[in-house]
Image: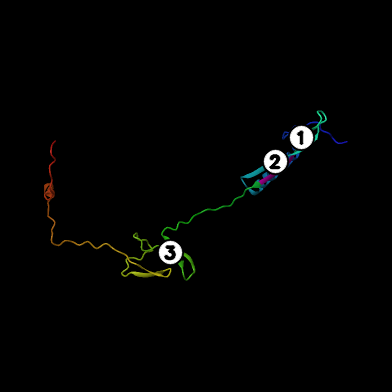
């Protein structure tokens, strides 16, 4: 004769969830062993429990007629993830470089930006003549403009003042402030 259960509660510690607890214990032990073996400081154990009601109408022997019953079904899944990451990061800043199409290589390359106002170590040092450069089928002529050299006035001589302070201000006009 089969073991008939008159009533049981629905708590995780009850017999209904024994298989779930056993499976979780097994997965936990395996996860801990793998973490120790692989030297991983992090792991994850997940438990999912799906609950589905089967609804059914049955004869109501006490009150007559029929009544709706709910029979639960519990499906569980216990899994673990051992996270071993090996990651390297970095970035490349291409300041002072521009991406241009190289016809000979048939690909994009990085070249130093030349001809900017700010000289770089890649700019030619004070070229005498403009240099022609071919970029994407167009001729580009770079010219470097310099400020003119300072010219000294030969006609004027600076006055020779001694260290006497009052002579320094002889050439300046100064109006005394008015009193209010």
Find the distance from the CA under tag 1 to the CA under tag 2: 24 Å
Q: Would you say 165 lies left or right of 108 here?
A: left
Q: Nearer the viewer, mark 1 or mark 2?
A: 1
Write down the quadrant of residue 45 in the picture.
top right
Q: Residue 169: image x %, image y %?
A: 13, 48
Q: Which residue is mark 1?
A: 68
Q: Would you say 81 lies left or right of 135 here?
A: right
Residue range in magenta is 73-80
Q: Is residue 41 above or below residue 160?
A: above
The local secondary structure at tag 2 comes to strand
Mark 1 or mark 3, earlier in chain: 1
Q: Nearer the viewer, mark 3 or mark 2?
A: 2
Residue found 65% across the figure and 49% down from its top? 38
Is 12 magenta? The answer is no
Name the residue at the right extreme: 1
Q: Is residue 78 above or below residue 90?
A: above
Find the distance from the CA under tag 3 to the CA under tag 2: 60 Å
Q: Which residue is mark 2?
A: 49
Find the distance from the CA under tag 1 to the CA under tag 3: 79 Å
Q: Is residue 67 above or below residue 131?
A: above
Mark 1 or mark 2, earlier in chain: 2
Write down the quadrant of residue 21 in the picture.
top right
Residue found 48% across the figure and 65% down from its top? 108
């Amino acid at each position: 004769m089969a073991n008939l259960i008159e009533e049981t509660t629905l708590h995780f510690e009850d017999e209904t969830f024994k298989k779930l607890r056993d499976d979780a214990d097994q997965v936990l032990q395996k996860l801990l062993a793998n973490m120790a073996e692989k030297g991983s400081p992090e792991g994850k154990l997940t438990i999912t429990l799906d609950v589905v009601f089967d609804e059914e109408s049955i004869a109501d022997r006490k009150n007559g007629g029929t009544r709706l019953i709910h029979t639960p079904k519990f499906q569980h899944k216990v899994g673990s993830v051992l996270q071993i990451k090996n990651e390297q990061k970095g970035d490349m800043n291409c300041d002072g470089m521009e991406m241009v199409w190289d016809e000979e290589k048939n690909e994009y390359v990085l070249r130093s930006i030349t001809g900017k106002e700010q000289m770089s170590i890649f700019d030619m040092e004070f070229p005498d003549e403009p240099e022609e450069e071919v970029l994407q089928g167009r001729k580009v002529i770079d010219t470097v403009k310099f400020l003119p050299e300072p010219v000294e006035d030969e006609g004027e001589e600076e006055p020779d003042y001694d260290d006497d302070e009052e002579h320094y201000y002889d050439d300046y006009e100064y109006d005394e402030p008015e009193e209010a």
